Image: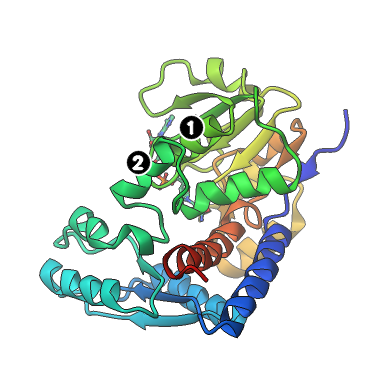
Amino acid sequence: MQMPLVLDGVAIAAEIKAEVAIEAGEMIARGVRPGLAVILVGSVAASEMYVRSKVKTCGELGLFSEMLTPPESVTTDELLRMVAELNARAEIDGILIQLPLPAHVDTKRLLEAVSPEKDVDGFHPVNVGRLQSGQPGLQPCTPAGVMEMLRRREIAVAGANAVVIGRSEIVGKPMAMLLLNASATVTVCHSRTRDLARFTREADVLVAAIGRPGFVTAEMVRPGAVLIDVGINRVTDAASVQRFFPHDAGRAAAFQKRGSVVVGDIDPAAFALSSAYTPVPGGVGALTIAMLMSNTVKAAKLRRGA
Ligand code: NAD
């Protein structure tokens, strides 16, 4: 069997970002600087890290960015006012509300308050509807990144059996819809699916978006399948590190140093059977910010016609 192709998300993200920087440069030359506003509520370390890298990437590509940091105690009404102001500002093309929000905030109401034209996360019902009906619009960054990765590495999905594990609004459902729009035959599996392996073994393209380390094992995968691993799971016990990475001295050293390593939803042992796969880290996760930048430029073009 041939060695599988590693779908290098870092390299593909660099390609996308370079193109976005060129487009942004052309728009700026015409007097339109694409702008992104990010709302970060409270101080959750992981969210802060994500938001900072989003803002930093905007700067690198020439996009304007702004970070709003209301305290944990902020009310839904205060956030709604903040969103309304951003909706009204001409120089803001994209509005991103970093999730999860504190439990007392009405997340659904807030996401629906973002103007669909500025909804760079693609979570507004109008954009969900546009995706469902195959109309152009803003699409969720992570699944859109997967499609971009497949397209750029010439992995055809038309006619393929695509199986998506996970049905979240953020990843699983839009992923299934994008694959369907690209003419794959799509099966969506989830926590209530009976005999999951029966479906996964039929997959030409298998997307795992579950949130459980190494959940998809080699026995569940058809040899030659394309394996897309969306999962990002931190494991903190030595037994799991040994189980998932028995011959990986680099991971063992990283675990010794930091006390944790990141594992996807697919057992790395399954990757050897595939024709192509996304590593974790450095696969799908690396694309999300690049797609956010791409969506911000797209939103600027659609709204300001530049
Ligand atoms: P979620 O918890 O909202 O959804 C998980 C899905 O997995 C659910 O639909 C559930 O039905 C399914 N599931 C759970 N247990 C199952 C089982 N035993 N068998 C079959 N299906 C099962 O999670 P999410 O937000 O969709 O994220 C999924 C994973 O992707 C997480 O690890 C998350 O960290 C990661 N993620 C990565 C990115 C990125 O790469 N940038 C973005 C979003 C999410």
Kind of residue at disc 2: Gly
115, above or below 267, in the image: below
- Mark 1 to mark 2: distance in Å? 22 Å
Q: Which residue is mark 2?
A: 129
Neighbour tally class for label 2: few under 14, some 14-19, many 20 plus, Cα within 10 Å: few
Frontmost of labels 1 and 2 is 2
Colouring used for the render: rainbow
Question: Could you say whether the residue bearing mark 2 is in a helix, strand or loop?
Answer: helix
**Image quarter where ligand 1 lies:** top left
Drawn side of residue 7 relative to residue 81, left or right: right
Residue drawn at x 47%, y 69% as measured from the top left: 300
The mark found on residue 285 in the picture is none
Drawn side of residue 45 relative to residue 7, left or right: left
Kind of residue at disc 1: Ile
Neighbour tally class for label 1: few under 14, some 14-19, many 20 plus, Cα within 10 Å: many
Mark 1 vs 2, N-terminal side: 2
Q: Are marks 1 and 2 in contact (CB under 8 Å)?
A: no
Residue drawn at x 29%, y 75% as measured from the top left: 86
Residue drawn at x 88%, y 33% as measured from the top left: 2
Q: Quadrant of the N terminus?
A: top right
Q: Nearer the viewer, residue 264 or 89?
A: 89
* Distance from mark 2 CB to nearest ligand 1 atom below 8 Å: no
Q: Nearer the viewer, residue 118 or 287?
A: 118
Q: Position of residue 279 (x, y in %)?
A: 67, 49
Q: Quadrant of residue 117 in the image?
A: bottom left
The mark found on residue 165 in the picture is 1
Q: Position of residue 12 (x, y in %)?
A: 70, 58
